[in-house]
Image: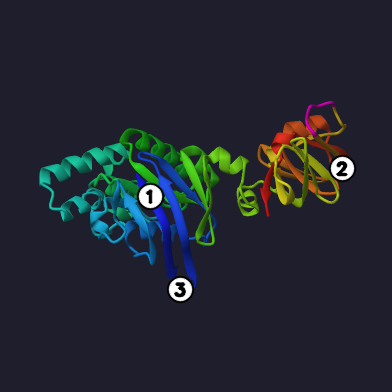
Amino acid sequence: MLRIAGLTKHLGDFTLAGVDLAVADGEYFVILGPTGAGKTILLETLAGIYSPDAGTIVLDGLDVTRTDPKDRGIGMVYQDYMLFPHLTVGENIGFGLLQRKAEPARIVNSVRETADLLGIGHLLERTTGTLSGGEQQRAAIARALVLQPRVLLLDEPLSALDTVTRERLRRELKAIHRVTGTTVVHITHHFEDVFALADRVAVMQDGGVVQTGTPDEVFRKPATGFVAAFTGMENVYCGVSKVRDGEATIDLGKIAVRTVTAVEGDVCVGIRPEEVIVSRESFESSAANTFPGTVTEIQKNGMFSRVFVDTGLPFVAVLTRQSIARLGLAEGEPAHVTFKASAVHVFTR
């Protein structure tokens, strides 16, 4: 439905470097990456705010690379809403239809239907300055949706909201997407957005896309060390892999881990904290990797705590506070870490 090929844009010292992406019809596609990765520039180039230096943007089979923004059928919602302060909520939502010279009756009906879909039908006569952050974001989304765009671009739409409002609007976005079937490209740096909303996700780094896949694929099988570190894998180490009979032993210096991979030579491995089991004593298990060590730190953080165990390499595990108490784990005390071969994810340096 949306295909981007070799998209390149130079802006000052920053370069959007040959981005290739394909988004399916009706897909909720999330682009994830740190600040400065180029997420917003990519969206603005798709919307036509910037003209690319190279590459193509194809929408529904039509090349829209040089098409005027208003003729692309693409709607965009910014993080800071960009509502008109001198207009009411209803006038803001209907502004695009008014510019298109739609019939007054159609504008009224479309504004009402879209506002009701976003749960702000009762706010149409209010001015935008009297709205909460969540209400302003809903109005901004309604203003884009009322035009029935072929693609809706969302630029960190939840970042400026408090936790409770963000979670509520996240659920509403999912419901709206289910009802409208609109193709959505949503950029964020919040992992919760990915798991709550995304059909697929792309990770950006330094102006390029470094991995694309389902949320589970990207978070559990990172393609690079950057993706592993960015997605919170934490237990990331580099070493040398030797493969024999389909099983690899990876020498990490202080310890060696076993996994199943065909990759040999210089590699990096990652083990997510939630896949690391911590115990006071070594126990019988089918897991291929068990190492003795010492608990160096326990960080309490709400329901879950992070337990650091030095086995020659520092491992991080995530346990409930009840599990820590039941196991009798304490800083300075001996402990074992255990993880399955399938929990070791291998990627090239």
Of marks 2 and 1, which one's residue comes earlier in the chain?
1
Which corner quadrant holds the N terminus?
Answer: top left
Task: Residue at 35%, 40% (x, y): give it.
Answer: 25
Q: Amino acid at mark 3?
A: Gly
Callout 1: few (<14), some (14-19), or many (20+) C-alpha neighbours within 10 Å? Answer: some
Which segment is the magenta one? 284-288
Q: CA distance from mark 3 to mark 1?
A: 26 Å
Q: Nearer the viewer, mark 2 or mark 1?
A: 1
Residue occupied by mark 2: 293
* 222 and 87: which is toward the camera: 222
Q: Nearer the viewer, mark 3 or mark 2?
A: 3
Q: Amino acid at mark 2?
A: Gly
Q: Is residue 286 in the magenta section?
A: yes
Q: Amino acid at mark 1?
A: Arg
SS category of the residue bearing label 1: strand
Q: Label the magenta part by its dominant secondary structure.
A: loop
Q: Is residue 10 in the magenta section?
A: no
Task: Residue at 11%, 43% (x, y): give it.
Answer: 105
Q: Nearer the viewer, mark 3 or mark 1?
A: 1
Of marks 3 and 1, which one's residue comes earlier in the chain?
1
Considering only vertical position in the picture, is 54 above or below 294?
A: below
Residue 314 placed where, x, y %? 80, 48
Residue occupied by mark 3: 12
Outermost residue on the bottom side: it is: 12
Residue 174 placed where, x, y %? 41, 37
Residue occupied by mark 1: 3
Q: Are marks 3 and 1 in contact (CB under 8 Å)?
A: no
Considering only vertical position in the picture, is 54 above or below 157?
A: below
